C-alpha cells in the first residue's frame, strides 16, 4: 500500500482479498521484510498484511515510540482505519507481545492468535544480547549478534545481515532501538503479560517456539493455563518464521482453516 494516512502504520500487503486477513507483527529490531518468505506462503490462499511497528523500518519516525504497548495501540488504530473488523494475528517476539495485547484490548477483532517465541510469557530474557543488538552499527558486530538469534545448525542468511547493516546506517535508528529496548525490559528481566487472561480470551491461541531459542527460553511455553496450543521445534532458535517457514505457515493455516 502507498500514500497511507498518517494514522496507519506502513504495511506490506499480499494475497487475494479475504474477510479475515492474516496480520503479521515483527519482533524488536526487525521490520515487515522479515516476514517476506512466510507471507509468500500464506498469501497463496489469504490476504496478508505485515506492519512496520513504531520506531522500526518505515515507521522509524512514528509519533509515539515504544515497545509492545505502543505497538499494540498503533496496530489497533491501523486496523480501525483500514476497516478491518476481524483478523488472524501473528506476532514474533515483541510483536507477539503486541499481538497478545491487541487481543486483550479488542478480542472481538481477533479470529486467532499465533505467537512465535513471544515476549512476556516469562521473566527470563537475554537482555545483554538485546541491548547490544540495539546499539550495534558495524557489520561484523551485527553478524555475531544475529547468529545468536538462530538455531545452532542454521546458516545465518546474508540478506538478514545486509538489511540490518543498511537499516543501522539511517540516522536515529540505533538511538531509537536503545530507547525501545528499555521499555521491554525490567533490569535484566522482561515485563510479563497476564497469561491467564490471554488463555481465557476465546479465540484459539497457538505458541510456536524454537527449542534452541537463546533470546527467550522455550521453557516459557511450559505449564500454560487453559487451552493454549504449543509447538516446540528442535534445532530451531528465536526466528522460526525464517528457519522453518513452511512449518510455521502450516501451523497458521491450522488456525485460519485454510488448506495446506
Image (cartoon, rainbow, N blue to C red):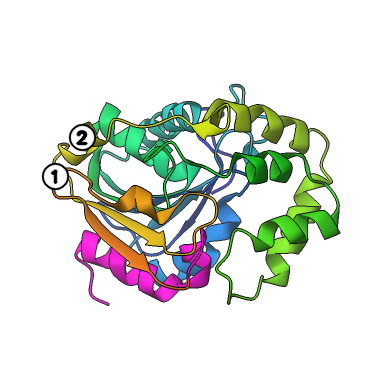
Q: Nearer the viewer, residue 179 or 190?
A: 190
What type of secondary structure mainly makes up the magenta span?
A: helix
Q: Is residue 162 magenta?
A: no
Does residue 67 appear in the picture of this structure? no
Please tell me which residue is depicted at 36% across the width and 41% down the height of the picture: 121
Nearest the viewer among 26 and 58 is: 26
Which label sits on residue 196?
Answer: 2
Q: Which mark is residue 226?
A: 1
Q: Residue at x 45, y 27 (%)?
A: 69
Say if residue 191 shows up in the picture.
yes
Region rendered in magenta? 236-260
Q: Classify mark 1: helix, strand or loop.
A: loop
In the drawing, does residue 257 fall left or right of residue 232?
left
Rendered-image quadrant of the C terminus:
bottom left
How many neighbours does mark 2 have within 10 angstroms: few (below 14), some (14-19), or many (20 or more)? few
Which residue corresponds to the image point at 60% horizontal and 25% vertical from the top-left? 65
Q: Secondary structure at mark 2?
A: helix
Task: Work out whether residue 236 or residue 104 is closer to the camera in this orientation and state it.
Answer: 236
Q: Position of residue 213 (x, y in %)?
A: 49, 58
Q: Number of labelled discs?
A: 2
**Would you say the residues marked 1 and 2 are in contact, meaning their CB atoms lie under 8 Å apart?**
yes
Amino acid at each position: 500500500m502507498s500514500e497511507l494516512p498518517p494514522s496507519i502504520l506502513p504495511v506490506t500487503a499480499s494475497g487475494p482479498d479475504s474477510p479475515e486477513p492474516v496480520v503479521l507483527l515483527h519482533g524488536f529490531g526487525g521490520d515487515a521484510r522479515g516476514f517476506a518468505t512466510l507471507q509468500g506462503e500464506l498469501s497463496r490462499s489469504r490476504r496478508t498484511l505485515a506492519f512496520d511497528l513504531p520506531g522500526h523500518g518505515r515507521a522509524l519516525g512514528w509519533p509515539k515510540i515504544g515497545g509492545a504497548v505502543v505497538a499494540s495501540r498503533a496496530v489497533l488504530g491501523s486496523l480501525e482505519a483500514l476497516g478491518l473488523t476481524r483478523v488472524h494475528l501473528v506476532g514474533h517476539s515483541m510483536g507477539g507481545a503486541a499481538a497478545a495485547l491487541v487481543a486483550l484490548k479488542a478480542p472481538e477483532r481477533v479470529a486467532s492468535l499465533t505467537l512465535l517465541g513471544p515476549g512476556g510469557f516469562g521473566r527470563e530474557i537475554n537482555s545483554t544480547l538485546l541491548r547490544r543488538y540495539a546499539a550495534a552499527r558495524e557489520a561484523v558486530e551485527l553478524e555475531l549478534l544475529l547468529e545468536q538469534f538462530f538455531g545452532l545448525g542454521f546458516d545465518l542468511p546474508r540478506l538478514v545481515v545486509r538489511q540490518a547493516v543498511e537499516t543501522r546506517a539511517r540516522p536515529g535508528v540505533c538511538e531509537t532501538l536503545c530507547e525501545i529496548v528499555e521499555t521491554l525490559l525490567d533490569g535484566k528481566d522482561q515485563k510479563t503479560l497476564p497469561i491467564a487472561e490471554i488463555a481465557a480470551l476465546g479465540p484459539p491461541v497457538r505458541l510456536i517456539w524454537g527449542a534452541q531459542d537463546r533470546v527467550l527460553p522455550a521453557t516459557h511455553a511450559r505449564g500454560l493455563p487453559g487451552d493454549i496450543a504449543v509447538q516446540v521445534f528442535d534445532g530451531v532458535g528465536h526466528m522460526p518464521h525464517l528457519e522453518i517457514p513452511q512449518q510455521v505457515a502450516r501451523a497458521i493455516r491450522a488456525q485460519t482453516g485454510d488448506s495446506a
